[in-house]
Amino acid sequence: MKEKIKIDKSILFLSEKGYYNGELTIWGNKINADLEVWENNEFITKIMENISWINNNKHTILEKFLEKANHYIDSFNDMIRKNNNENHSYITLEEFKTSISIDYLSVYIRGNTVWSVMELIGEPDYLLGQREQVKINENYEVEYLGSTEDNIKH
């Protein structure tokens, strides 16, 4: 395998563990990324397609995430209500969506199949300290995997 690869304006280097590691820009933010390749083939185009899809489909990814994780909005607003905290206003769905970003992305390729797993975080931390995982499969279907604590065995 090559010692380094270039994706957009980023260069990722082959690690001792056998995967590429570096920074990518996703949703306007620089994030850490790992690219795992099981077979030596021409994979850069497939990875770029996957990353481009993620960049262009933030709304789709967040909508699927919110189908399972909308409890965070209620939990955060309940905390404000219970504490009678006049310094904080209740958060809206749009504020919640705006707070979410990708902290870490892993892209996997085996043969012609490419999929990715990302860790979502919130800033401000409307995820209440949790890191949430979302998977994009080879057909660009979005699956919410749960918090990283739930997926330690992943």
Image (cartoon, rainbow, N blue to C red):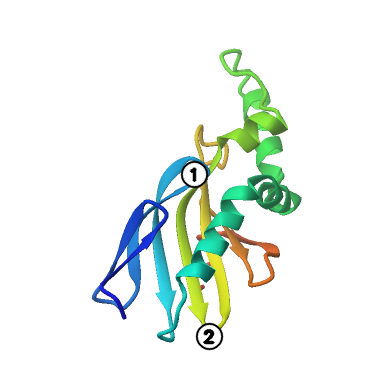
For mark 1, does the 10 Å Cα neighbourhood hold few (<14), some (14 to 19), or many (20 or more) residues? few
Q: Nearer the viewer, residue 43 or 68?
A: 43
For mark 2, does the 10 Å Cα neighbourhood hold few (<14), some (14 to 19), or many (20 or more) residues? few
Outermost residue, top side: 86
Secondary structure of the residue carrying tag 2 is loop
Query: Residue sitting at 40 percent across and 85 percent down?
Result: 40
Q: CA distance from mark 2 to mark 1?
A: 36 Å
Give the residue number, with chain letter if any, for mark 1: 129
Query: Residue sitting at 68 percent across and 63 percent down?
Result: 143
Left or right: 63 in relation to 20: right
Count numbered badges in the picture: 2
Give the residue number, with chain letter if any, for mark 2: 111
Residue 90 visible in the snapshot: yes
Amino acid on which the number 1 mark rests in the picture? Gly
Secondary structure of the residue carrying tag 1 is loop
Q: Position of residue 1 (x, y in %)?
A: 31, 81
Q: Which mark is residue 151?
A: none
Q: Position of residue 147 (x, y in %)?
A: 56, 57
Q: Nearer the viewer, residue 134 or 39?
A: 39
Query: Residue sitting at 64 percent across and 72 percent down?
Result: 138
Query: Residue sitting at 70 percent across and 65 percent down?
Result: 141
Q: Which badge, 2 or 1, is on the more N-terminal residue?
A: 2
Residue 153 visible in the snapshot: no
